[in-house]
Amino acid sequence: MVFQSLTLFARSRGPDEFWRKRKIFKLAAHFVGRKRNCYSIAIRYVHRALRYATMSRKLKKADMLNLWNTRLTAACAEHDINLRTFKEALMRNNILIDRKTLVDLAIWEPRSFKSLTQLAIARGKQDGLNDVMYVKTPPGVITRGMLK
Amino acid sequence: MAAFGRLAVNIGRTLISQESRRCLNLSSALRIKEIRETRDGKNLIVEGVTIPSPRVPLLVKNTARTGACPVCAAGLDVKHTDVLILSQFLRSDGCMLPRRVTGLCKTQQKRIGTMVAMAQKAGLMPNIAPANSRRDPKRRKDWKKFNTYFDEKTIKAKFV
Amino acid sequence: MGNVSSKNFVPRSRKFVRRNQKSFFQHKHDRKYLTSIMSAVKRAQQWATFARTWHLFDATWQNPFDSAQVIIKHLMGLHKPIYHPMNDCGDHVVVMNSRDIALPGDEWRKRVYFHHTTYPGGASWTLAWELHNKNPTLVIKKAVYNGMDGNLQRRHTMQRLHVFPDDKIPEEILKNISNQIRYLRPVPTRLDHISPEEVENYPKIVDYPKQYILR
């Protein structure tokens, strides 16, 4: 851009209008109707979309946590232990696996997950957690607390 | 041989006891006190003998030293579906026995009474009922013919 | 890790799936996979993960509204670790003996079902026992329907619920069933269904007082 005087330079608004608008149109490319073609309408909806995107970065984390909780509740129910007791017993065993990984184990390595639940049940029985006192476990499950 | 036979019949009669030949009963056939007649020579001795109740060998011992009532002492959490327990407090027509007979505390008497009513409404004790009542729940009218259960928490009489 | 070996590294297999192995290879597209590198058994395990299981639920003496919560879980697939709202992993549930459901207290005559024909004066209120008289499957169907969130999936999920008023279930449905959902409340026993010996020999709590005349 060419500026003939300092005043004109101060009045000019950033880069060339075409490139400035193109940035917005790129973000609005997937909108439908005039939202994607008319600049004054597109900019409103792009601003709204960006606002949503900002909010959703937090919401996504909550959604994922919800999903993991739902899946883990189901996975634990298959092995006669509830999620709360399961997590508590894992913590007492010093097994620090997060929910995401536990869900991955439950889906892709069901036998690893089953052994985790058995460890948790054994630990729960040893510590007298009411929920697991009457759950049957195979003999020979040894937890950290038993090796004293 | 004939005398021998007569003797056997006589022994049999005495063994069967005189009661079976009596056509008049002074009290109900089932009773805790039985009236016995024995003939000693010319004297007829009529006596009332307390016979052991059929429940004695099955009785749960009340070991409470505080004088708690049998249900409290047994530490039972009775539900309205426990018909084997509830039926012990009933007359044959389905009425609740009074407190002086059952010997329960006031609260338990009320609770058991309420639970008996619940069990009867749910049709769980159709064989202990007056003859004219609708014994089979399926033959009842309207909403009464459908299964109903009750929550014991709704019983007003309770220990605080 | 414990006594369970994790050497059998296979994709997740459903715990309760017991399907007829023969039926897996019926379809012509399925036969094609048999020649693939992965062994047929393990592939079948993965199919079983996504296969629809059929569950049986006996509604005798069960509260329909409590049972609905359990039935919904199975219908939507919420009992599987592979659950995702957009993953179509729900199972079928067959409810039998819906005529024998039980409601607590006086709910048979206090619970009201509302309907409006959208015409003026078209409102009607039906008591639960009247509805049950008309159609013994509707109380539990409505309990399940109303227990779910109202979204586009709800009516499709309802298609997987099969309710029968008694224990007569069609043969083609019965042959699919491979699991039973545990009851929520025990079925009470009627006193006249217990043998007289057991009633007589049951431990007694109270004795009769002396001089008492039995009636």
Image: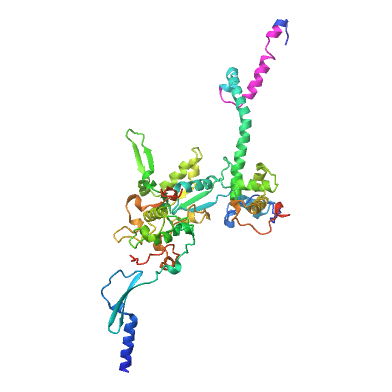
> Is residue C119 positioned above or below C178 on the image?
above
Left-right relation of B87 to A38: left
Residue at horizontal 61 percent and vertical 23 percent from the top: A46
| Residue C24 appears in the rendering | yes
Q: Which colour scheme appears in the figure?
A: rainbow
Left-right relation of C17 to C141: right
Name the residue nearer the viewer: B125 or B48.
B48
State the image coordinates of residue A133 (x, y, percent, origin top left). 60, 54
Residue at horizontal 64 percent and vertical 31 percent from the top: A57
State the image coordinates of residue B6 (x, y, percent, origin top left). 30, 90
Name the residue nearer the viewer: B88 or A24.
B88
Quarter residue B137 falls in: bottom left
Point out the image quarter for the C terminus of chain A. bottom right
Q: Residue furthest bottom?
A: B1
| Residue A80 appears in the rendering | no
Q: Is residue A96 magenta?
A: no
Left-right relation of B95 to A71: left
Name the residue nearer the viewer: C189 or A3.
C189
Quarter residue A37 falls in: top right
Point out the image quarter for the N terminus of chain A. top right
Name the residue nearer the viewer: A103 or B48.
B48
State the image coordinates of residue C73 (x, y, percent, origin top left). 53, 46
State the image coordinates of residue C28 (x, y, percent, origin top left). 59, 51
Q: Which residues are magenta?
A: A8-33
Q: How many marks?
A: 0
Q: Is residue A16 magenta?
A: yes
Residue at horizontal 46 percent and vertical 46 percent from the top: C65
